[in-house]
Image: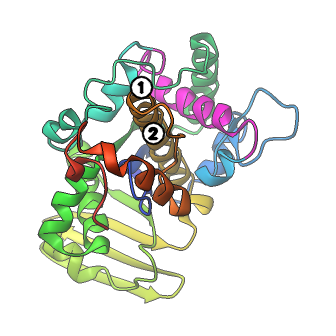
Amino acid sequence: MVFVAGIDEAGYGPFVGPFVVGFSLFRVPDWELDLWKLLHPAARPKPPRGDRRLLWLDDSKKVHSGKYGRDRLERSVAGFAELCQPGLPAADDGLDRFVRCTPSGPARWLDAAAWLGRMDESLCPRIDPDRARLDAAALRRALEAGGCGLDDFGCRAVPAGEWNDWIEQTDNKSETLFMVTMDVVRHLLARTGHAPLRIELDQHGARRQYGPRLARALAPDRVERHGETRGGSAYTLHFGERAVQFRFSQKADETHAPVSLASLAAKLVRERAMDRFNRWWQERLPAVAPTKGYGVDGKRWLAEVEAEAAKHTDPALLRRVR
């Protein structure tokens, strides 16, 4: 038995709101097994129109698009989360539990942002608990048919205040992305003990060389480089007798099922955090329209709250420095 994990992020570019790294961890008989094919009876990219039995499993930007995108996103996350942690998606504190589970960062950053704090609400409020249980049962049947299981599914959320603290330490946005990702990697290493592990990740921008960074962050005995090309980079890190594979590739959130699932976790937590963010600010500044935090609209929102924001929160907890 071996493990394959996927890692992906959401919220790397906005001016406000958290940066989130999602992850999933599957137990499989071997790395050659096709998880897409195995999951096909229960989840797939863009299920046939009108087929309500199937979950969407794809790059979160595709799943979340269109009129029913949020419903699709919540349902997919609810099904997999119910499989991994029964009862969590509909629990009154499900969002808080999902965000604060290991490998969560220092709690003080979540607590300092008043719009986050104790997130005592459902992770997937649009999804009926019975629907989540049915979806989880279908996923379980599909995975068990191939001798597989979903062993972990979660995220690492980084509020703006913590993000700014990281930037102060690294002075580099890309380095901050990498270091937060390594928090998730350390969790996966601990979670899998001494078992063989492969970690699939999306490329970090146009970067090709990850070996020195992996060595500094994880301190393996040896880093074996298999290739560093425009299409992807691959390494094996040796920890004593244990070998852990890392594969960075283009569009990994479309080509590797564990990365697709990780992208859904990251996207939903980002969306749920922004739900709370906008609700909190509209209670105090009702004339200011909600924002997703990106681009022109993010700048619009910051300009509209500029005169009043400091009365309600520390600006360092609100706006990202980069």
Q: Amino acid at mark 1?
A: Glu
Q: Amino acid at mark 2?
A: Met
Front-lying residue, 317 or 308 = 308
Name the disc covering residue 283, or none. Answer: 1
Dot 2 corresponds to which residue?
274
For the point 32% across and 34% down, the residue is 99
For the point 61% across and 10% down, the residue is 130
Q: Main secondary structure of the magenta part?
A: helix
Mark with earlier residue (2, 1): 2
**In 3D space, how far apart are the residues under numbered discs 2 and 1 (Cα atoms)?**
14 Å
For the point 62% across and 29% down, the residue is 75
Front-lying residue, 122 or 102 = 122
Name the disc covering residue 204, or none. Answer: none
Query: Quick check: 276 above or below 29?
Result: above
Highlighted range, magenta: 66-90
> Percent x, y for residue 31?
48, 58
